[in-house]
Every structure is written in structure tokens, then in C-alpha cells.
Image (spheres, grey):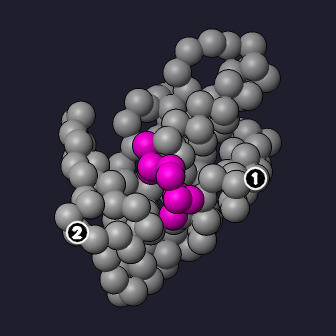
Amino acid sequence: MGRMSDLTTTRRHLPHWTLEGSWYYVTFRLKSGILTDEEMGRVLDHIKKGHALYYRLIAVCVMPDHVHVILCPNDGRTISDVMKGIKGVSSREINRRRGRRGALWQGESWDRILRSEEEFREKFNYMFMNPV
């Protein structure tokens, strides 16, 4: 993990912390409606394809109206870059298949730098139990 002096913070509606080398727990939601089982599979496949290329992926949980991921952006990439890629590509693909245009996902994601093994386990267990 980077030095705390390298930590940057930004805010739109939610606060966003960026620290190179950090693991993030991220939740992002649909703007409205739900995904079909096929669409959830496509989102899952897209996120898995980014592993190693853009980020290191530990866990992903795709639900009908939201997604959770635990990942670490590769060197030179920010969590913002990674989320734009995940949401942008999956949105275009699903919209193309639906014959629609416009935003699929809410504009802002909720992200948190995981600061300890205990916090990692808590978020991982929450993701694992979310579908239950």
C-alpha cells in the first residue's frame, strides 16, 4: 500500500479516497429496474475479464440491482478509471442488447479502501451472504 502522504480525496456526493496499491470494496447500483439472469452473467464475465489486465480481483457479487467487488487497481490506474471501464462497457453492452440508450448505472459508486484484514473479511462475508 502507498504512503498516507500519497492519499488523495475527492467528493461529488460521496467521498472518494485514492491511494495507489490499496484494495477497495466497491458497490454500484442500477439507475432503475433490474438485470435479467443473462445480463447479470454478462456483467460478471466482463468484470472477470478485467482481472490482471486492469486490476486484481478478489471477489465479485452481481445482484439484480447492484454489484459488489473487492479489487486493487493495477499500478498507474485509479479506482475511478477502473469503475468507468467496468460500468461503461457493461452499460453499452446491455443497452445494445436491450435496444436502448442512456445511463444504466447510477453515476457514482460507493467505494472504500480496505484498511485491515478484519475489514476485508467483514466485506467479503457480507458479499458472500448478500444473495442469501
Q: Residue at x 53, y 46 (%)?
A: 82
Whole-Å distance between the Cαs marked 2 and 1?
31 Å
Work out which quarter of the rendered image holds the N terminus and state it: bottom left
Q: Give, as a single range, the part of the protein colored magenta.
A: 72-80
Please provide percent x and percent y for residue 33.
54, 30
Task: Choose between 49 and 41: the one closer to the eye.
Answer: 49
Q: Is residue 67 left or right of residue 116?
A: right
Please provide percent x and percent y for residue 30.
50, 35
Please provide percent x and percent y for residue 66.
51, 47
Q: Is residue 2 left or right of residue 6?
A: right
Q: Earlier in the sequence, mark 2 or mark 1?
A: 2
In the picture, the disc for residue 12 is: none
Under tag 2, what secondary structure?
Answer: helix
In the picture, the disc for residue 4 is: 2
Q: Is residue 37 visible?
A: no
Q: Residue at x 63, y 53 (%)?
A: 54
In the picture, the disc for residue 49 is: 1
Residue 77 in the magenta stretch? The answer is yes
Residue 97 in the magenta stretch? The answer is no
Q: Residues within 10 Å of mark 1 (few under 14, many from 20)?
A: some
Image depth: mark 2 or mark 1 in front: 2
